[in-house]
Amino acid sequence: MSFRGDKPQQETLAVKRNTMDNGATVLDILGGDNYLGLGRSSLSGQSMSEIFLNIKEKTLAWKPDIIRLWKFPKEMKEFTIDQQKNMIAFSGSHFRLPLLLRVSDKRVEPLPESEYSAPLRFQLADFAPRDNFVWVDRCYKMAQLWAPELALSTDWCVSQGQLGGQQIVQHVDKTTWQGKTAFKDTVIDMARYKGNVDTLKIVDNDIRYKADSFIFNVAGAPEEVKQFSGISRPESWGRWSNAQLGDEVKIEYKHPLPKKFDLVITAKAYGNNASRPIPVRVGNEEQTLVLGNEVTTTTLHFDNPTDADTLVIVPPEPVSTNEGNILGHSPRKLGIGMVEIKVVEREG
């Protein structure tokens, strides 16, 4: 749909087209060419979707030739990660992190992560069993597969290998970190491949890690948690409650909470939720939490005679905002920002 201020008229063009044609159509309206890359103007050109009925398959078949036009590197043997700039460099090219690369004998295909692309682990799940990959991302994202000791680390890590073969994970522990690719020609194990693909496709809320508290700046939850709701995606500091996903923060544990326990909450409030009483419930017992706009730690004391297994936190006035939101996503309704929640059993 386009609106022209110089031609206030309504007209419908019932032609076969695709989204690649949008730029070429606008360029044509502005007096330029009627083509742009693989796009053709819907006003004066013929769309590739009319010429090729299988345009998706055609475009994928042209992928290597399109990549060559960008003059991406043809090999990757050594690389450098700059933590201050969040960049990786190899063969004279620089790319922003995080990044996934498919490495073959004749070309290197970079697959970045953006607001409009699938997370890198979902993209990696589409790789063939023998495809060589280099994946640079936050450690916890790959730790559930190959490095459980890094499951709570938000540092950069590098993993490489083949989904059906061997994989290694390296912790980026220097400001400027040097690495080398090391792909081994190993026997492909299809059971291993399927297991890796299945794990890569686990959605964030279903990921579980070993910890004695709920750490909110990584995906998933501790193994003791059965399910949770009303909580937004992980950010570098933690996670916001989001009333668009649920009016209350609800954390259900696999087993009943202790008869007597302390609930240690490290959190902050958003907007008008600051300095207001926030109900925190376990079974029939309710305590009050008061937070400011900065992160603080509060300990609440609970008795749980009914063996309740669910913790509920109810932000009083969730605020609709795009602050810190992903471009193109609906506004979130933020209440409290959670860094960590820990259940500590009390004696007696």
Image (spheres, helix red, strand yellow):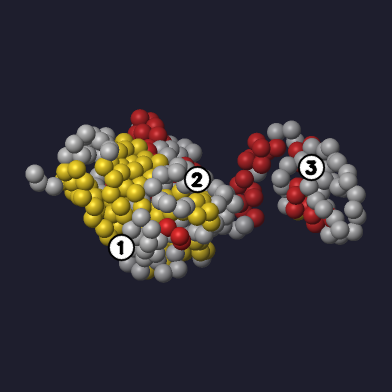
Q: For the residue carrying disc 2, how many other residues have a C-alpha within 10 Å: few (<14), some (14-19), or many (20+)? A: some
Q: Picture coordinates of residue 153 (x, y %)?
A: 31, 55
The three-letter amino acid code for the residue at tag 3 is Ser
Q: Earlier in the sequence, mark 2 or mark 3?
A: 3
Residue at coordinates 46% horizontally, 64% vertically from top-left? Answer: 87
Left or right, 118 with respect to 239, comes to right
Q: Out of 268 and 183, give the one closest to the viewer.
A: 268
Left or right, 287 with respect to 114, comes to left
- For residue 47, the mark is 3
The three-letter amino acid code for the residue at tag 2 is Gln
Residue at coordinates 80% horizontally, 57% vertically from top-left? Answer: 27
> Between tags 3 and 1, which lies in front?
1
- Quarter-of-image position of residue 246: top left
Q: For the residue carrying disc 1, how many other residues have a C-alpha within 10 Å: few (<14), some (14-19), or many (20+)? A: some
The three-letter amino acid code for the residue at tag 1 is Thr
- Per the image, the residue denoted by label 1 is 296
Which element carries disc 3, helix, strand or loop?
loop
Residue at coordinates 39% horizontally, 64% vertically from top-left? Answer: 293
Q: For the residue carrying disc 3, how many other residues have a C-alpha within 10 Å: few (<14), some (14-19), or many (20+)? A: many
Quadrant of image for the C terminus: top left
- Per the image, the residue denoted by label 2 is 244
